[in-house]
Image (tube, helix red, strand yellow):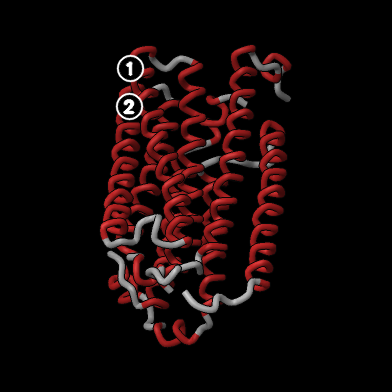
Amino acid sequence: MTPISQLRPTHAEAASAAKIFGFWAYLMSDAVIFALLFATYVTMSQNLAGGPTGKQLFDLSPVFYETLLLLFSTLSCGFAMLSLSNKQKPRLLIWLGVTFALGLGFLLQEYSEFDQLIGNGAGPDRSGFLSAFFTLVGTHGLHVGLGLIWLLVMMAQIILKGITLPVASRLYRFSLFWHFLDLIWVSIFSVIYLPGVL
Amino acid sequence: MNASTSARQANLAGYLKGFLLALLLTLLAFTLASYASGMDFQLSRLLRGMLPDATETIRALPQWIIISIIFGLAFLQMLVHIRYFLHLNFSLQQRLNVGFILFSLFIIFIAVCGTLWIMRDLNQQMLPVSSE
């Protein structure tokens, strides 16, 4: 049996638990947004307006790079959480730095892919299919970009404030956000790119 | 629950296991798409060299079966992410989160299926465009 004193959370712990629940509420509202963008994409995917199809545009190689970069960054984010629970500050900063570098690599790869598509006249203004494609993949990319800014802020807080309870709680919520974005990316390559090249 | 207890549930073996499972499911999905489309990616030649030559068999399959398998692999990979990275489980501490997530999935189901159903139906009722 657990002693009563351990069952009753401290005030700080209870506040942290409430924030984690609130963050799940945010993540789920974000999931609803992505789900509706997916529904829009599937509805629009045949509306080519005489423009290029997914099979003509998509290339599996950059998508595979992007997938690996995000998957490795999710792993390094997990390693950062392990360093956090062991209170190893230098190791935590290194893993967060690795996560940042991999996330930035993902964004640069996505930018070059978008740049190439728009350069080939397949921008979001070309057809309903491409509008829906850029909206969905762009929204995910925007989330990754904002996640990178959040990551920089957290690294600064670790350096300036140390690993305090509020900083640890924020880092835990960041890790939820980051893993959630990888989960959305799994749906993106499985709904857009892989069926697109068939 | 707080950050320290949730981090304690997580361990190195769990993250590595989740990562390897996710990587395997990703490779399977990409290799299947590569077989079916004939399009290459970085590891496709290597993987196809290791696997038996199934190009004929896979190309003979109707497209909806291949897409269903890709969706099935994605669903499995999401379960892996939820289990090993997001650490959701049915413990007492997480019951509120899980209930909230299931409710959100219900909302998503209604919104997505409703959208696809109604838009498909409307599309079929449209008169064909006579000319550009």
Determine if residue B25 is in view. no
Q: Which residue carries the number 1 mark? A: A159
Question: Residue B23 location, x and y as percent?
Answer: 41, 56
Discs 1, 2: same chain: yes
Question: Residue A83 location, x and y as percent?
Answer: 40, 29
Specify the quadrant that holds the N terminus of chain A: top right
Specify the quadrant that holds the C terminus of chain A: bottom left
Q: B79 or A43: nearer the eye?
A: A43
Residue B6 left/right relative to A87: right
Q: Residue shown at 35%/71% (left/top)?
A: A56
Residue sitting farthest toward the front: B131
Are there few (<14), some (14-19), or many (20+) residues within 10 Å of tag 1?
A: few
Question: In the picture, residue A94 is in which quadrant?
Answer: top left
Question: Residue A99 location, x and y as percent?
Answer: 34, 37
- Establish if A165 lies above or below B27: above
- Residue B31 is marked as none
Question: Residue B39 location, x and y as percent?
Answer: 33, 73
The chain letter for the residue carrying disc 2 is: A
For badge 1, the amino acid type reads Ile
The mark that comes first in sequence, 1 or 2, is 2
- Establish if A74 lies above or below B41: above
Does the residue at mark 1 contact the one at mark 2 (Cβ under 8 Å)? yes
- Establish if B55 lies above or below A23: below
Q: Residue shown at 52%/58% (left/top)?
A: A41
Q: Residue shown at 32%/53% (left/top)?
A: A114
Q: Which residue carries the number 2 mark? A: A93
Question: In the picture, residue A146 is in which quadrant?
Answer: top left
Q: Secondary structure at mark 1?
A: helix
Count of numbered tags:
2
Q: Secondary structure at mark 2?
A: helix
Are there few (<14), some (14-19), or many (20+) residues within 10 Å of tag 2?
A: some
